Amino acid sequence: MDVREMSLRLHGLVVLRGLLSDAVMEKYAAMLASAASGEEAFITSAAQFEAALFDTGRCWTDYLLDAVLENDNICIRRAASGGASQPAEDALASELAFLQQAGCTGLDELLAGMPELLAACSFLPRWETKKVDFAAAYARRRREVGKKGYGMFARYHVFTVENGTLVPVRCPDPQRLSELPGYEAERAKVIANTKALLAGLPANNVLLYGDAGTGKSSTVKAIGNEFASEGLRLVEVKKNQLYQIPAVMESLADNPLKFVLFIDDLSFSSNDDDFAALKAILEGSVGGRSHNIAVYATSNRRHLVKERLSDREGDDIHAGDTRQELMSLSARFGLTVTFQSPDKQRFENILLELARQYGVQMPADQLYRKGEAFALRAGGRSPRVAKQFIELCKGGVPL
């Protein structure tokens, strides 16, 4: 296949057409197209392609294969439901065969039929290639789509919501479960619920509530990191974005991955419009909740809605019904896990484990005494305070 034919085939992609928007692929396509424009134009385009490819630090075959495996297209989206139409499947097979040839072709092979242009390019570096079966690799990815995902879900595992659409978080909090000592029993419930979600079993919405700094948010983030390889994706939602969530949930309903919608530091005033939105999301709408989505929320308040004594002395004829309405929100979380401030023994255990993790060398009795004094100055014991104390010790900051 000569350069012109490769250029035509590349621009004629149908199922995998999304590859053309990839930054490196754009430069590869420009290089192919410039072959008929003279030596200078081709050399410029080839250098631009190589600069973009070498910046990734990978060989051309690996880069192109990964781009193919992560591509969002109709065939991979319908892999879990029996596949796409036969014409689409046939087009995919043809495109995979072509891209395998392109990915395994170096500069010398590419210009084999154009000896003068090849001679002019003698000073250019050669990109690395290898022999890989694209069709076999793609078949494996389709079988594993429930864990690997596709599109941006293959590249990232944490997302936020912007204007009703998901945006990947490129540098998520790297928190791991093994780095969170002291609340193993509480986290075990959330972990078990998450495993049920991943296994396709009935999973509950989860409310993690309790004192500040006890690791509620860290638990959810760590679970998102821990089970990313098992097909879990974490979507952080701000309270003022709750009205956008039904559209997001609908877009994720047919995705083979599993999703946790994470709402941090949740609370409402009694007349908050977002109150009704969350009720509908949890279980109150006619559409119901998709089997691959669960809501995990954290709060310092058990009943989520702020209620004043004056609220009980108003002119509401059915005040009892109103209070039941306010309390009903927390009841819609099937699993509620309480994180209380640690007692002295638990706090000391947390200090000891964190000191081990950070490599802080200090006699246990001295560690406990200084840690307790630091907690007193910080306003009380908590895992967050313990971590701050250990980090200061590790940094050599006088206490």
Image (cartoon, rainbow, N blue to C red):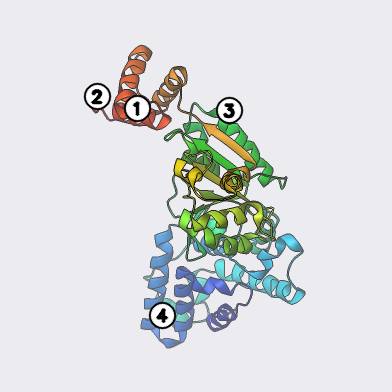
Q: CA distance from mark 4 to mark 3?
A: 63 Å
Give the x, y percent position of residue 112. 52, 77
- N-terminal-most mark, 3 or 2: 3
Quarter of the figure with residue 324: top right
Residue beneath the point at 59% across and 37% down: 336
Q: Nearer the viewer, mark 1 or mark 4?
A: 1
Q: Which amino acid lies under the numbered mark 2 shown in the image of this protein? A: Leu
Quarter of the figure with residue 303: top right
Mark 4, residue position: 42
Mark 2, residue position: 399
Residue 335 higher or lower than 274, as above or below: above
Q: Which amino acid lies under the numbered mark 1 shown in the image of this protein? A: Ile
Q: CA distance from mark 1 to mark 2?
A: 11 Å
Mark 1, residue position: 390
Mark 3, residue position: 185
Question: Horizontal placement of 273 versus 247: left or right?
Answer: left
Quick one: quadrant of the N terminus? bottom right
31 or 241, nearer to the observer: 241
> Crowding at label 1, few (<14), some or many (≥20) Cα neighbours within 10 Å?
many
- Can residue 174 be seen from the camera position used here? no
Q: Are marks 3 and 2 in contact (CB under 8 Å)?
A: no
Give the x, y percent position of residue 53. 43, 64
- N-terminal-most mark, 4 or 2: 4
Q: Which amino acid lies under the numbered mark 4 shown in the image of this protein? A: Phe
